[in-house]
């Protein structure tokens, strides 16, 4: 019962009938003291269901629930480490060992996905955390997050395993269990993958399935040809799949004048990661390829446009609105002001935007590293110094642009992407360029985080594709 006390201190009831997966994650993430990286209410950084929307829109979850793979994806995106197992690929003995491990630990928690009907309960698929284990009776304690239906209850482990080892009709795949722990390394602060845009499925399938086949079937003489093959035919804008993170908060008594210690630490971190990325050969290669092929960045990727969009998204979340279309933003009202920390001037500014959410006006502040005054954002060119390509950028291009998103995505693609390139010289060169081992520490953490996200996203993408095929076969 070692894990019970941590879980019960954060135990709560699901806010919606189909929110069992989200609420289970909220309980576990808060029990593990995973930092959501943003405030919940007042000064408190605390997970609630509204924050867990990176892998599936909340409106969809509210209507249809959430799948096993999406829950594991959400846990990973939220900053936890996840080991997920389908029951049909596991065994009762392995399940029992994980139950014992998690019940005996305060920093390892087990989430189960099971069929209620096998437990003689009302309903079908359900998620809940396991709060304890009785070795002599071989029973597990289910902390049911649908507390309006069932209190915490003990279940014979063999019966619970039978409920796990059932097929989810929505996906045609087995249910299962996952062990969730706090990551030993800090979570990302600058880049993340997003599944909010419906085009992510096409991006996922193209990058993880089609690109390796394209690279295998073509003969290359230059690295630029490889980059063109990978990015020249993207099915969607890269910004629909790779996002950069902006911190926003409601303005209280005017714009922010001071930032807290955590914010002071994160701002230079973001600048450092971006600077490290722009010093990689991957970024130089992307810039060179874009110039040679006249690939233009979107016209709306200026800092003000990005901040405006972030403020609108934040306003909808703070108002509890899941519908982004209900938000009206006023571009002319994006304003800047300097901030301080502990009385000292810092390299940061607050960009404030006035927005309307469901007819109610709200001012949202976005905190960004201080922007030097100069020319256009995101413009760059490749120069040669000592025979090596280098990129020169305008001073104010500190915030991520299309070049940065493409470069970090190139670094985060699985190593297996390049294995089938026929030319050994080209294969060796691209492998050196995208190798994560030689990256600076901060950038390496960011890239590894994106790589792990891609792994869970690819599983979800494959699962949804199989589900769609099954539905088509059923209709036929």
Image: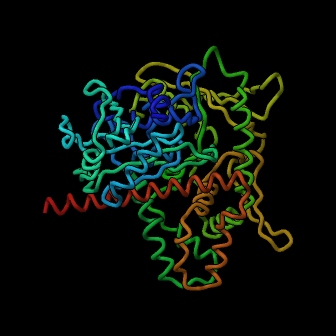
| Residue 330 locus on image (x, y percent) | 53, 29
| Residue 45 locus on image (x, y percent) | 57, 28
Q: Quadrant of the C terminus?
A: bottom left
Q: Residue at x 71, y 66 (%)?
A: 281
Q: Residue at x 75, y 36 (%)?
A: 370
Front residue of 414 and 382: 414
On screen, residue 101 above or below 423: above
Q: Quadrant of the N terminus?
A: top left
On the picture, is 341 further left or further right than 16? right
On screen, residue 1 above or below 157: above
| Residue 88 locus on image (x, y percent) | 30, 59
Choose top left, top right, bottom left or bottom right for residue 37: top right
Residue 291 appears in view: no
Q: Residue furthest left?
A: 476
Residue 301 appears in view: yes
Q: Residue at x 67, y 45 (%)?
A: 399
Front residue of 142 and 231: 142
On screen, residue 109 above or below 274: above
């Amino acid at each position: 019962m070692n894990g019970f006390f941590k879980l019960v201190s954060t135990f709560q009831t699901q806010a919606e009938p189909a929110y069992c997966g989200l609420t289970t994650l909220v309980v576990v993430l808060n029990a593990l003291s995973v930092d959501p990286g943003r405030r919940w209410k007042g000064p408190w950084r605390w997970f609630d269901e509204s924050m867990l929307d990176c892998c599936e829109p909340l409106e969809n979850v509210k209507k249809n629930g959430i799948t096993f793979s999406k829950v594991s994806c959400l846990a990973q995106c939220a900053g936890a480490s996840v080991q997920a197992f389908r029951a049909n690929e596991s065994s009762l003995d392995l399940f029992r060992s994980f139950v014992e491990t998690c019940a005996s630990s305060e920093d390892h928690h087990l989430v189960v996905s099971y069929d209620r009907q096998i437990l003689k309960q009302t309903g079908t698929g359900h998620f809940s955390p396991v709060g304890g284990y009785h070795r002599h009776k071989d029973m597990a304690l289910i902390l049911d997050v649908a507390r309006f239906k069932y209190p915490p209850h003990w279940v014979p482990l063999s019966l619970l395993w039978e409920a796990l080892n059932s097929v989810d009709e929505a996906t045609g795949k087995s249910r299962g269990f996952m062990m969730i722990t706090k990551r030993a390394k800090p979570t990302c602060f600058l880049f993340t993958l997003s599944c909010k845009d419906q085009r992510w499925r096409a991006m996922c399938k193209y990058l993880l399935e089609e690109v390796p086949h394209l690279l295998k079937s073509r003969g290359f003489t230059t690295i630029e040809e490889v980059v063109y093959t990978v990015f020249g035919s993207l099915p969607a804008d890269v910004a629909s799949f790779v996002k950069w993170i902006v911190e926003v908060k409601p303005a209280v008594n005017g714009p922010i004048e001071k930032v807290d210690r955590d914010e002071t630490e994160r701002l230079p971190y973001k600048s450092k990661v971006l600077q490290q990325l722009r010093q990689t050969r991957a970024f130089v290669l992307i810039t060179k390829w874009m110039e040679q092929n006249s690939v233009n960045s979107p016209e709306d990727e200026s800092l003000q446009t990005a901040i405006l969009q972030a403020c609108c998204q934040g306003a909808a979340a703070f108002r509890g609105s899941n519908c982004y279309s209900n938000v009206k933003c006023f571009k002319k009202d994006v304003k800047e002001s300097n901030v301080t920390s502990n009385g000292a001037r810092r390299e940061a500014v607050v960009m404030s935007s006035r927005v309307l959410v469901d007819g109610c006006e709200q001012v949202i502040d976005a905190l960004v590293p201080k922007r030097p005054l100069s020319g256009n954002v995101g413009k760059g060119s490749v120069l040669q110094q000592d025979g090596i390509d280098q990129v020169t950028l305008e001073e104010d291009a500190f915030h991520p642009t299309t070049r940065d998103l493409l470069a970090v995505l190139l670094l985060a693609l699985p190593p297996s992407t390049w294995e089938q390139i026929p030319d050994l010289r080209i294969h060796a060169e691209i492998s050196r360029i995208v190798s994560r081992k030689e990256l600076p520490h901060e950038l390496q953490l960011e890239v590894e985080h994106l790589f792990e996200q891609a792994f869970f996203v690819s599983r979800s993408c494959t699962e949804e594709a199989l589900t769609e095929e099954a539905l088509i076969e059923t209709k036929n």
